Amino acid sequence: MPPPVAIPERNWVNIQWLARLRWAQIAGQAATVFVGQFLLEGALPITSLLLVISVGLMSNLGVELYFFGDRRRGNAVARPVSEWWIAALMALDVGILTGLLYLTGGPHNPFGFLYVVQIAMATVLLRAHWAWILTGLSFVGFGALLVVHENLPVTEDNRAVGVWVALGVASAFVVHFLLRITSALGARDQELEQARGLAARQERLASLATMAAGAAHELSTPLGTMALAAKELERALTKAGSPELAEDAKLIREEVGRCRAILEQMAAGAGGTVGESVATCRVSELIAETLVGIRTSPTVHADVPTELASYELRLPPRAVSQALRSLVTNAQDASPPQSSVVIRVRRDDGTLSIAIRDRGKGMPSEVMQRIGEPFFTTKAPGRGMGLGLFLARAVIEGVGGTLTIDSVDGDGTEVQVTLPTDVAGAQVKTATIRRLPGGASVVSNRT
């Protein structure tokens, strides 16, 4: 299994957010200046204002080139980002806002509300001490405007409009931040549930592997003894002229052999394929290996496009084919004898899609809620132990793939398997710790 891809560190994510928000901020400042110049009939010192705005523009261009230029040229390695870079940019933004307010009425300018936006951004993107520093800087900046600023003749009507617009802009920024954080928390909650489910399945798989290996070890000797005794009994009954009893002894020996085969299959399915190395195989070879040993009825039809049959994959072929074979066997068990199970294979970019469709009765919702649990089965006693789908999901997810089930009661079931075409280069799911902007930590299921 390849190592998980390194997660982007928190400051890298935060500076991406900040750069995008600063572009919106610069555009808003420029638009406000031009609209104000129109409403105030040219009373604004527009040259000075545009020079102050250009400071923010040039600084954000520098951020784009320095931090993101290599990524846009195809370099996958991100530059390290220190938190003081983010704090310095936000301090510069406080200075730019103070300069704009100084030129446009100082504390009488209703856009002083935007200091609150800067403080909210600092709270979201920075740790507590930086947030307090930015808060203090904003407080000092507005305090300086009380002492010195350029007066701007504004009528009461225009001042009221300015307050209205400033309140709307500040509110929009704050709501945007809150929605982004709420959305991020919702996504992390979903990832947390997926991580818990994946961890639980891996723990069950490990327990099952231990149990299967122990059972195979402990039962191998008595089963071997029983098989040997049944064989000797069969020979003795055959010589004694009791063919019916000899057949019974033969049946016992065959059933003992079947028990040994089931134990070996459990051990191999649960733990024997976990350490299998990645190898190159064609799609046609993978499907052919999947169909080895399956029953002749119901028939299985493999729909593999000609151009895809020779496509090469890099994955653990024995483990994956065994997982797919288990799904095909389940589809055969669910289908009437005269019907046909269909395997449809398609490729999409870096993934291989394999759909297995049966012609059975489908599954009701209460069964769908439990399907895939170990030792849960709807088959008749003796037909299965409820491990095939569980083990198949574990193997497929272990190589970075997904398994989904779509079933309608009365209309059959389709199992959709998505596999990476190159497991060595795929992003394999692992449970990791991720940090939200502001330092909050959550467990996430990521690739």
Image: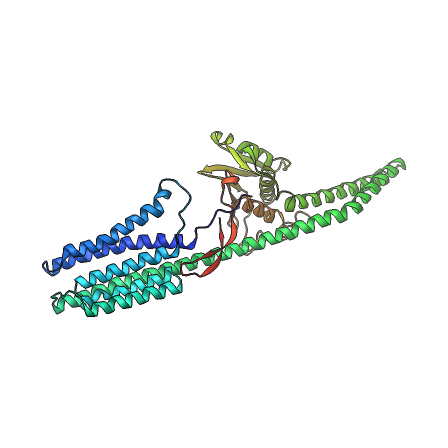
Residue 156: x, y in percent? 13, 69
Residue 285: tell me if it is visible. yes
Residue 333: x, y in percent? 61, 44
Residue 255 lies, with reference to residue 11, above or below; the image says above
**Which residue corresponds to the image point at 29% horizontal and 51% vertical from the top-left?**
60
Residue 363 lies, with reference to residue 122, above or below; the image says above
Quarter of the image containing the N terminus?
Answer: top right
Colour convention of the picture: rainbow
Name the image quarter holding residue 91.
bottom left
Residue 14: x, y in percent? 38, 55
Name the image quarter holding residue 150.
bottom left
**Which residue corresponds to the image point at 27% horizontal and 67% vertical from the top-left?**
140
Residue 55: x, y in percent? 24, 53
Residue 376: tell me if it is visible. no
**Which residue corresponds to the image point at 23% horizontal and 66% vertical from the top-left?**
112
Residue 363 or 4: which is nearer the viewer?
4
> From this viewpoint, which residue is outermost toward the right?
240
- Could you tell me how many numbered marks the image carries? 0
Name the image quarter holding residue 10.
bottom left
**Which residue corresponds to the image point at 54% horizontal and 35% vertical from the top-left?**
302
